[in-house]
Image (cartoon, helix red, strand yellow):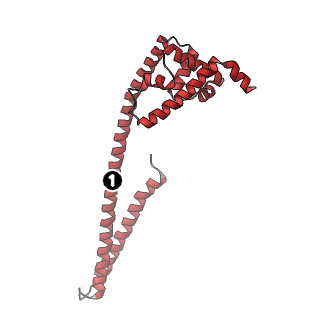
Amino acid sequence: MATPASDAVPRLRIGLTTLLILIAIWGAADLALDRPQEWLSIHVVVEIGFVLLCLGSVLYLWLGWVQARHSLEHAEGRLAANEVERDRWRGRASRLLHGLGAEIDSQFERWSLTPAERQVALLLLKGLGHKEAASVLDRSERTMRQHAVSVYRKSGLAGRAELAAFFLEDLLLPMDHKGEHEQESEFEGEDMAAADIVARPEVHVAARR
């Protein structure tokens, strides 16, 4: 789609080229009308140099514009190729993610998770904590913790880190051991807190009061 700026460039090129050519023609005509007796005089040399300068400027400008046009076409070609490659990757990734989603859902079914527990498990897999999951599902954080503990109990997994590893470990690049231990410690602390609240709800209710 043409824009005002893109339309102005060809007009500027044509206008500037026409002006330089007219100046060159005017200089050549003036030189011819003068009918100089000596072609090596200062006046003749200046006018010839002026005409040649105008013609050289025209040539220089057109060569620059041609080069710029070729560079633009090359960039547009690369962009189009990148867009095609991006669309192909999205298509392949979409099929893979669809298959992964179906496998995750099948595994949830084998674990006999309830619909609410499946929602919580998916949010945990996406990296959300209990508080964020509660906000997304518009439920209390304590309910999210109860569902999380139920998911871990039915799946036989120790916590969110093992839940994520169960489905995603082979899909991700290896991370450094320090980061891995820190992330596992964070998950384990949150999972232990969830289990403690579910196991001793009266203590936490009294503490809140």
Q: Dividing the image into 4 quarters, which one contains the N terminus?
A: top left
Q: In which quadrant of the rendered view does residue 7 lie?
A: bottom left
Residue 123 picture location, percent across and down: 54, 25
93, 121: nearer the viewer: 121
Judge whether 68 appears above or below 118 on screen.
Answer: below
Residue 128 picture location, percent across and down: 55, 29
Examine the rendering and report whether any part of residue 33 can be seen. Answer: no
* Left or right: 83, with 109 as reference point: left
78, 184: nearer the viewer: 184
Residue at 57 percent of width and 29 percent of height: 129
Residue of label 1: 71
* Left or right: 90, with 202 as reference point: left
Point out the residue furthest to the right here. 209
Residue 101 picture location, percent across and down: 45, 21
Judge whether 89 appears above or below 40 on screen.
Answer: above
**Amino acid type indicated by mark 1:** Ser
Which element type, helix, strand or loop, lies under badge 1?
A: helix
Examine the rendering and report whether any part of residue 61 can be seen. Answer: yes
Q: In which quadrant of the rendered view does residue 179 lie?
A: top left
